[in-house]
Amino acid sequence: MSMNNIKAVLKRELYGYFSTPLAYVFIVIFLLLNGIFTFNLGAFYERGQADLEPFFRFHPWLYLFLIPAIAMRLWSEERKSGTIELLMTLPVSIIEAVLGKFLAAWCCSAIALALTFPIWITVNTLGDPDNTVIVAGYIGSLLLAGGSLAVGSCISATTKSQVIAFVISVMICFLFILSGFPLVLDYFQGWAPQALIDAIASLSFLTHFESIKQGVIDIRDIIYYIVFIAFWLYATVVVIEHQKAS
Amino acid sequence: MTSENTAPAIEVKALDKRFGPIHAVKEISFSVQHGEVLGFLGPNGAGKSTTMKMISGFLAPTAGTVLVNGHAVTDSPLAVKAAIGYLPEGAPAYAEMTVSSFLNFIAEVRGFSGAEKHKCIEHVVQLINIESVLQQTIETLSKGYKRRVGIAQALLHDPNVLIMDEPTDGLDPNQKHEVRRLIQRMAAKKAIIISTHVLEEVDAVCSRAIIIAAGQLLFDGTPAELRKRSAAHDIDDAFRQLTSEFYQSQGTSGQS
């Protein structure tokens, strides 16, 4: 694997995001919705607590719609415009291309997340929060975004249509959020062995995010996200490899 | 290195491709030496682009092998892709990029950096004559310029194997002439495959011609030999005769 190639693909992809309105729209909407959710729904002031819990609480739901929106173009657009033929006949391996593209999209979401820094300043001005918990929240949020992006990358590779890629990615991310909820777990309750129910619950984005958000950086939660991302990126490679043959 | 010079630059052996029930390419074999320009001819849907996509490593063959400078495309795809300059059908390029940033990307992926990178971009920009559009985004370019950017991209690393799918499609007569002269100039040092619908192009630039129809190889020889197939000593005529004879023997009308 050549870092040089990953960097070149990453740079090109970032160019694609920032030379079109896409990245700006994503960042502005992300910040706007974050503000609304944190202050209105999350009752940031009314709670009278110096922490960012009401800020991070809504990230899984924000990402549910916004992340598939930036991931859907990753491969669908290449297939639609035919540039995939160019990319795949350059001396870049599929893994390098998949990683470069994924990292570019992740950079985008990291930039959007970094631009929420005023709320961190605000909470530090108003009170005396535990900043390690806040840092953990940011790490958790970034990992959550990475997980959804990896799903989006794989689904995007399966279709020429960005709309289909978006809808299916939202569906899959939704399932991974819900899998920790009674709504899904109740369905298995009663007939499935407890080990399976635990396994399904442990796949949930939410349960892992929840503990990181509270400032408990458990290595298992980090590993969960890393394995999750690696799995979906590997699936992306398999999908693209498969298209070569058909 | 001497072995590379005597061995064919491109060797296609019993190359076969099926898309489900469609048998697109049927056990085609041919080879191209350095210094040769091979014209790839055939009716629409004959399997020309599919064959070129397999040589460039974009599609995996169902059976058969492709060797480029002695490397099998399926075994060492990156070595082959590094050696080849490829212009895909329709010259796809990232629409939102400027020509300059697009060529920059290609150069970086091809392993150039710093002064060397600028030198090779500058060289190819002058060679293809696209200075005036360097700062324009690719989506705003005319068809002719878009095609030239595609050619520039394929030539950037001065490859010794060049594969171009319809390089002159959509160009005006002057631009066509320029591209042909460019190919002639490069011919001595490279192994070149071009596909084309313009049969006069075969006369102008190709040292050998191949005709395929319905995925089968119908003819492999020099343009002069091809002309001899027609009573009127005309390439167009010879092409029509060969392909229509073939389709008659297959019992189809010629539209696949």
Image (cartoon, coloured by chain):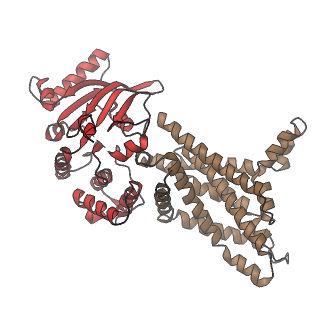
Chain colours: A brown, B red
Q: Quadrant of residue B27?
A: top left
> Residue B41: where, in percent of width, then height?
25, 33
Q: Quadrant of residue A220?
A: bottom right
Along the horizontal axis of the image, is B118 left or right of A203?
left
Closer to us: A220 or A116: A220
As drawn, which residue projects farthest toward the left?
B232
Q: Is residue B256 visible?
A: no
The residue located at (70%, 58%) in the rendering is: A144
Residue A69 vs B209, above or below: the answer is: below
As drawn, which residue projects farthest toward the front?
B2
Quarter the C terminus of chain B occupies: top left
Residue B156 vs B218, above or below: the answer is: below
As drawn, which residue projects farthest toward the right?
A190
> Residue B73: where, in percent of width, then height?
40, 37
> Residue A142: where, in percent of width, then height?
67, 62
Quarter the N terminus of chain B occupies: top left
The residue located at (85%, 40%) in the rendering is: A195
Along the horizontal axis of the image, is B234 left or right of B82?
left
Residue A102 vs B249, above or below: the answer is: below
The residue located at (86%, 36%) in the rendering is: A192
Q: Is residue A59 visible?
A: yes
